[in-house]
Amino acid sequence: MLEQGAIDRLAALSIAPQGHVIGGKRLAGETVFDVVSPIDGKVFTSIAEGSVADVNRAVAAARAAFPAWHRAGPAFRKQVLLKLAELIEKHALELAVLGVRDNGTEISMALKAEPLSAAGTFRYYAEAVDKVYDEIAPTSQDVLALVHREPLGVVGAIVPWNFPLMIGSWKVAPALAAGNTMVLKPAEIASLTLLRIAELALEAGMPEGVFNVVTGRGSVAGKALALHMDVDALAFTGSGPVGRKLLEYSAQSNLKRVFLELGGKSPNIVFDDVADLDKAVKVSANGIFRNSGQVCVAGSRLLVQEGIYDAFLEKLAAMTVKYRVGNPLSLESDIGAISSADQLAKDIAFLETAQREGGTIRIGGKRLLEETGGFYLSPAIVEGVTPDMTLSREEVFGPVLAVTRFKTMEEAIAIANSTVYGLASAVWTSSLATAHTMVRAINAGVVHVNTYGGADITVPLGGFKQSGFGRDKSLHALDKYTDLKTAWIDLK
């Protein structure tokens, strides 16, 4: 049970300037930059601005630690990762508050989605590591063919600012469980919780150099990691333009594998025969407005069939105005802050463009609480959005919902598939035939039926088209971080 007093006490703590975690030690950078809280727009600490030399040191530490970590075997790695999961849970509230101060996610969501989710992810892969077996191929009797899984070596990871612990753990946990070592570069505006996790990993018994965190700018530290000749794979979650650069850097260096989980413009499709209109309204609102819309799988395009369009939008607008936007560390707030001043400006620019192109803002879209210095925006519903409009094609990453009316299932399919993205989607219907048809027809890595969100660690997450081709979560994630080696043994 969250208590406001405990949250306030943790929020009042001063945070010392933060250095990298390399080879098991905190190392200050030659230069630093300020960490600005989106809650009030004030500087509350600083982090090291990673250089090429810092990345080189981290990769060297990871390479040196790799043989022992790999040879230690699954049982030892399982023990360490389980202990790390336990420590994350022990420090869950501390981590949640630290993360909220960094990126503005509302605390009730942050606690569940960040440290508690991360703990569950580390526990899942810890338990899996000694249960995934190699293979014996069905050859003739005079041959023994073995298929071994081998760790790749040093894995780099670059993760975004919206859910750094959750998304970071999706990459770190399976990579370490498979026997790799890691260098992770967090987002510039959300590095603090991942630095703390690196410290907890050492406390859990993880050998020095196995897990390293280098903070800094993507254009310097991220680029250096992607170009490094001794990094064997790179896992990335973020924007399409950066993903393209990472592929170029791989080609320019050692052809390292690059796993990309990129943006989305996910359709949330409500048919006339939806069984529970009120549930669909509530879940759809949460699907776009939670964490101020700063979610890669957000249902940012709402497609409503014309027979229920007016009733649905009336209920949706009535629910949206009830959201309490405010200090994300307050339990009275339903929606927290936009992550940065730059992101807030982008969100507002998208709304202005939507109006110029013919859209109508039914509700919201106003900057709030400007007197606090923080970055807050009222959740916006934009009607009259057509597939050719900017708001229908480009990812906003803010609390902005584009609404489109449709007549037939065929029209809904065409609109749903009309963007370059294919990350997530949803279908609301009481018809089993419609549900199955839509699941097959929508080009997306995830299709929810009569819900939005909620998929857990047991199933993969990733997209089609320009949403990338990385797959996080589930046992399938282990495939990214291992190589297959065949041993062909002649028994004659």
Image (spheres, rainbow, N blue to C red):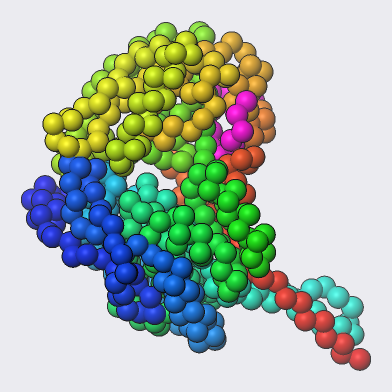
Number of numbered discs: 0
Residue shown at 63% from the left, 54% from the top: 248
**x and y percentages locating residue 380 in the rendered image:** 34, 22
The C terminus lies in quadrant: bottom right
Q: Is residue 285 visible?
A: no
Residue shown at 25% from the left, 32% from the top: 376
Q: Is residue 16 visible?
A: yes
* Position of residue 274 in the picture relative to residue 246 (left or right): left
Q: Quadrant of residue 434?
A: top right
Residue at the front extreme? 30
Q: Is residue 236 above or below residue 417?
A: below
Residue shown at 13% from the left, 31% from the top: 371
* Position of residue 420 in the picture relative to residue 203 (left or right): right
**Along the line of sight, which residue is nearer the eye, 248 or 374?**
248
**Along the line of sight, which residue is nearer the eye, 289 or 460?**
289
* Position of residue 376 in the picture relative to residue 372 (left or right): right
Q: Quadrant of residue 387?
A: top right
Is residue 279 located in the magenta-colored stretch of the structure? no
**x and y percentages locating residue 176 in the rendered image:** 49, 71
**x and y percentages locating residue 391 in the rendered image:** 48, 23
Bounds of the magenta segment: 418-435
**Along the line of sight, which residue is nearer the eye, 289 or 30?**
30
Residue shown at 13% from the left, 60% from the top: 14
Q: Is residue 193 above or below residue 107?
A: below
**x and y percentages locating residue 347 in the rendered image:** 37, 30
